[in-house]
Image: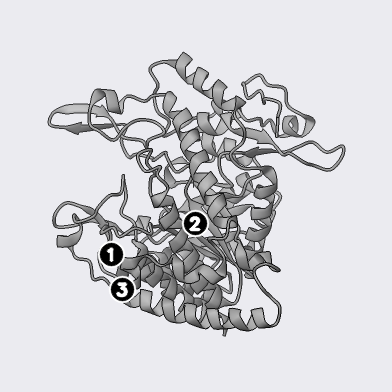
């Protein structure tokens, strides 16, 4: 579809609705911005952004609205959110294998959760755009040499050389192309027959199939296959029912690089006659903010408050009820179900004490948010060999605490936010494979943080399924 280019400059004209709120895609420039790279050549950055403005959107407004409707069901307790994928994607992994394996394990996890909870699972990948990473320091020193920190492939390279670490605006264009390629594969997998429920045995990789949770999955898949055979005998087949042969699969990433997000901001394609078309971020279906960029007066809040996409916010152990209510007011003043996802990341042992007052404040204010649990980021430790890792038992503990808090408050434990891969990596300790410190270095391929492998991801899904089944009863 041909589209007019969108003027995203700071002086771009805005419609009446935009003017009333003093928002337009570039209004974030007048707010303090954190975690943005320092480019040596401002003209090169402007040139790259100008090219991005001419490119087609990566996703479309109708998909954004569809996701918001599904997340509204999650907020009401009639669906469950599964958000998962890479810590940081790499330009070096564009052969499709990593994306396909992540898609497969998320299909398996969603199947397990759907069967247990008897409710739809909204599948949202950390994929096709997760190329930027926040850093605790702007520079890194090795052997007496200080260079800019690695901020993800959209900014610079991981290699510790001046050339690799120099922020390069051309990487914005590479990120767009990489995201488009991955999205093309995901759409084909979701709608081209691979996600057909009759193929559910094919979703299991060999290393997962040999594990205890793989055997458990095969038993579940056998029961579902029998049910599908019965349905087919009654005339309900994949040919007749699209729900059996394809899935909705959405994308998300952390909204860090605001130049990139601004350049990919578009107007909705179809709106009621006479209505002003709202803006949406066309880089992903959902964008989220981390702990480092959720300042109320900051540039990231300013950008996200003006787009129609669902927005997520990471909530750490230091957040107060006042903080959370202020974030909700800034990002969802109209209190629209499906707009705001609050993603807790507090750490095992802390969440049980820190989360209840936040949940109570949101509940008492009547805010229709989705509560999701990120049990990964609060449980990162360093092994005896100096390798960053996470303990599976701590991940499980935080998830259990999350469900318990919501059960006590009478609120909805709406979803999971997990760093995972379907590949056979050895990055997180424990689980059914009983990975130890000594095995972490065997297949540690993450560009940044440790991820659950396919076996551990499926094991976690079965544990959450038990919690959802108990909740259902």
Q: Is residue 341 above or below residue 74?
A: above
Q: Is residue 120 above or below residue 166?
A: below
Q: Are marks 2 and 1 in contact (CB under 8 Å)?
A: no
Q: Are marks 1 and 3 in contact (CB under 8 Å)?
A: no
Q: Nearer the viewer, residue 285 or 405?
A: 285
Query: Residue reaching furthest right?
Result: 274
What is the spatial separation of the Cα atoms under label 1 and label 3, in whole angstroms? 22 Å
**Which circle's residue, 1 or 3, is located before the other in the chain?**
3
Foreground: disc 3 or disc 2: 3
Residue 394 visible in the shown view:
no
Q: Which mark is residue 391?
A: 1
Foreground: disc 2 or disc 1: 1
Task: For label 2, count other residues whose C-alpha is less than 10 Å away and answer few (under 14), some (14-19) or many (20+).
Answer: many
Q: Which residue is mark 3?
A: 210
Q: Which residue is mark 2?
A: 343
Residue 147 location in percent, x, y?
Answer: 25, 27
Q: Nearer the viewer, residue 194 or 294?
A: 194
Q: Where, by quadrant of the figure, is residue 88 drawn?
A: top left
Residue at coordinates 71% horizontally, 68% vertically from top-left? 240
What is the spatial separation of the Cα atoms under label 3 and label 2, in whole angstroms? 33 Å
């Amino acid at each position: 579809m041909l589209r007019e280019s969108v003027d995203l400059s700071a002086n771009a004209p805005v419609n009446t609705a935009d003017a009333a709120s003093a928002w337009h895609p570039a209004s974030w420039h007048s707010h303090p911005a954190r975690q943005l790279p320092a480019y040596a050549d401002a003209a090169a950055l402007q040139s790259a952004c100008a090219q991005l403005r001419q490119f087609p959107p990566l996703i479309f407004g109708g998909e954004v609205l569809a996701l918001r409707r599904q997340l509204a069901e999650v907020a009401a307790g009639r669906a469950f959110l599964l958000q998962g994928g890479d810590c940081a994607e790499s330009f070096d992994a564009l052969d499709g294998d990593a994306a396909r394996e992540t898609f497969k394990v998320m299909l398996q996890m969603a199947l397990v959760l759907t069967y247990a909870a008897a409710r739809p699972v909204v599948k949202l990948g950390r994929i096709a755009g997760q190329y930027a990473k926040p850093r605790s320091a702007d520079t890194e020193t090795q052997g007496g040499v200080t260079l800019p920190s690695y901020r993800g492939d959209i900014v610079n390279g991981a290699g510790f050389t001046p050339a690799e670490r120099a922020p390069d605006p051309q990487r914005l264009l590479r990120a767009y192309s990489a995201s488009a390629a991955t999205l093309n594969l995901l759409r084909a997998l979701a709608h081209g027959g691979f996600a057909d429920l009759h193929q559910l045995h094919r979703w299991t990789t060999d290393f997962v199939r040999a594990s205890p949770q793989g055997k458990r999955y095969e038993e579940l898949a056998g029961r579902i296959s029998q049910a599908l055979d019965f349905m087919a005998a009654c005339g309900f087949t994949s040919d007749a029912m699209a729900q059996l042969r394809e899935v909705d699969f959405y994308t998300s990433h952390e909204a860090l690089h605001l130049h990139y997000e601004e350049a990919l901001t578009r107007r909705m394609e179809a709106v009621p006659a006479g209505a002003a078309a709202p803006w949406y971020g066309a880089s992903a279906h959902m964008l989220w903010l981390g702990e480092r960029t959720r300042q109320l007066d900051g540039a990231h809040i300013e950008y996200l408050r003006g787009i129609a996409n669902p927005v997520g916010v990471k909530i750490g152990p230091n957040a107060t009820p006042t903080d959370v209510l202020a974030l909700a007011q800034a990002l969802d003043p109209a209190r629209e179900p499906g707009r705001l996802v609050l993603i807790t990341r507090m750490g095992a042992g802390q969440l049980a004490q820190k989360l209840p007052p936040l949940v109570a404040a949101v509940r008492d204010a009547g805010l229709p948010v989705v509560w999701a649990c990120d049990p990964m980021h609060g449980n990162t430790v360093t092994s005896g060999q100096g390798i960053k890792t996470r303990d599976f038992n701590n991940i499980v503990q935080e998830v259990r605490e999350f469900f318990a808090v919501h059960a006590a408050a009478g609120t909805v434990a709406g979803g999971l936010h997990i760093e995972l891969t379907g590949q056979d990596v050895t990055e997180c300790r424990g689980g059914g494979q009983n990975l130890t410190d000594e095995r972490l270095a065997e297949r540690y391929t993450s560009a940044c943080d440790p991820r659950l492998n396919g076996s551990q991801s499926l094991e976690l899904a079965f544990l959450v399924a038990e919690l959802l089944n108990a909740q259902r009863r």
